[in-house]
Image (tube, rainbow, N blue to C red):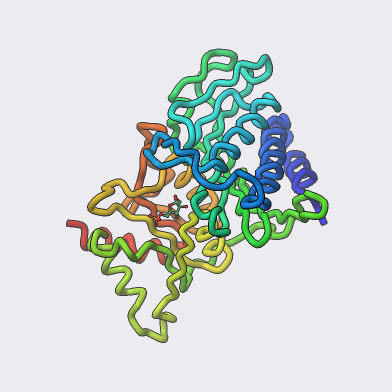
Amino acid sequence: MITLGEYIVAKQNDFPEATGELSLLLSAIRLATKVVNREINKAGLVDIIGTTGIENIQGEVQQKMDLYANDTFKAALEARGEVCGVASEEEEDFITFNGKRSVNSKYVVLMDPLDGSSNIDVNVSVGTIFSIYRRISPLGGPVTLNDFLQPGSRQVAAGYVVYGSSTMLVYTTGHGVHGFTCDPSLGVFYLSHENIQIPEDGQIYSINEGNYLKFPDGVKKYLKFCQEIDSVSNRPYTSRYIGSLVSDFHRNLLKGGIYIYPSTASSPQGKLRLLYECNPMAFLVEQAGGSASDGFNRIMELKPTALHQRVPFFCGSRNMVADVQTMMEKYSS
Ligand code: P6P
């Protein structure tokens, strides 16, 4: 039984050039995860569920837990001094850390501190998503927006925490995808899923079919393909949609499947954010042997133009993403 901390250090020792800063950064995320996990597990008993009545930059009402998680991750990242700046779904602009160590650190973090938080009130699992880059501005100088607007292919690390029936942290530093499960009696994350690989074919599709009439024709064609009866290709597939990206992604990562949040007539760029939802999930799924696209292009090759930009998202088993991309190209109006 190896702990997350032991694993991070062991993997760091595999790379002589590693300075340990990324290891300390990942440890800061580990600490914040434990604090947030504790609060989520007692949500409903204390006055921490429900909404703040405040809208975030997205125009979505902030949940009390959104702000708690955001503040907890920011504090943990600032305290460790390994990060010079953070961008968050809950912050309109990026945050600069001005501590002595922070200004000379080489990493920036982008995060969705609590994705799917509206599910907390009804005890449905939620998650944290993070993405780590090396800054491109000079060490010691001011953090700039361009430090955050890097294509996903330049990520140094990415991961998520799923606060579900058990709490798991899953991350990659570009050398495979590894999952750690929290032992609540000790508050320790133990390695439970080393080198996760997503099946190249799956039988699960995850999409909000309530928006069917607003979907592009290529998505409509793909959904009908999923529902056809064909024993050779194990169709009809199974529809599973929790309404929590991290939970749907995690299940599909382990079992095979595809998650789709496409553009719709009312949301031409879809709903999910490129920088702190799609890019980290794309890094993880590619490291696990899957793929992630906007329906036409590889997600991690998109050049970001704004912190909170949205992008259509097709992510999961390689052959399933290829199938829907073929239909998107064939039927794109
Ligand atoms: P809809 C949660 O708000 C989220 O960002 C993802 O976690 C989830 O997959 C999606 O939105 C659900 O959106 O429009 O289907 O309710």
Residue 180 locus on image (x, y percent):
70, 54
The residue that appears at 63% across and 17% down in the rendered structure is 104
Question: Is residue 210 or residue 299 the one in the foreground?
Answer: 210
Is 212 positioned to the left or the right of 82 in the image?
left
Residue 43 appears at what percent x and percent y? 63, 50
Q: Quadrant of the C terminus?
A: bottom left
Counting every numbered tag in the picture gives: 0
**Within the image, what quadrant is residue 150 found in?**
top left
Q: Nearer the viewer, residue 16 or 25?
A: 25
Task: Indicate whether 145 appears above or below 167.
Answer: above
Expressed as whole percent of the image width and height from the top left, the position of residue 270 reads 33, 49
Q: Is residue 275 left or right of residue 38?
A: left
**On screen, 120 above or below 10?**
below
Vertical side of 146 occupied by 160: above or below: below
Residue found 35% across the figure and 46% down from its top? 311
Q: Residue 247: x and y, percent?
A: 54, 58
At 72% from the left edge and 59% from the top edge, which residue is drawn? 192
| Residue at the far left in the pictured view | 333
Q: Is residue 169 visible?
A: no
Residue 332 in view here: yes
Quadrant showing the N terminus:
bottom right
Q: Quadrant of residue 319?
A: bottom left
The image quarter containing residue 206 is: bottom left
Picture residue at 32% right of the left edge, 64% below the top: 210
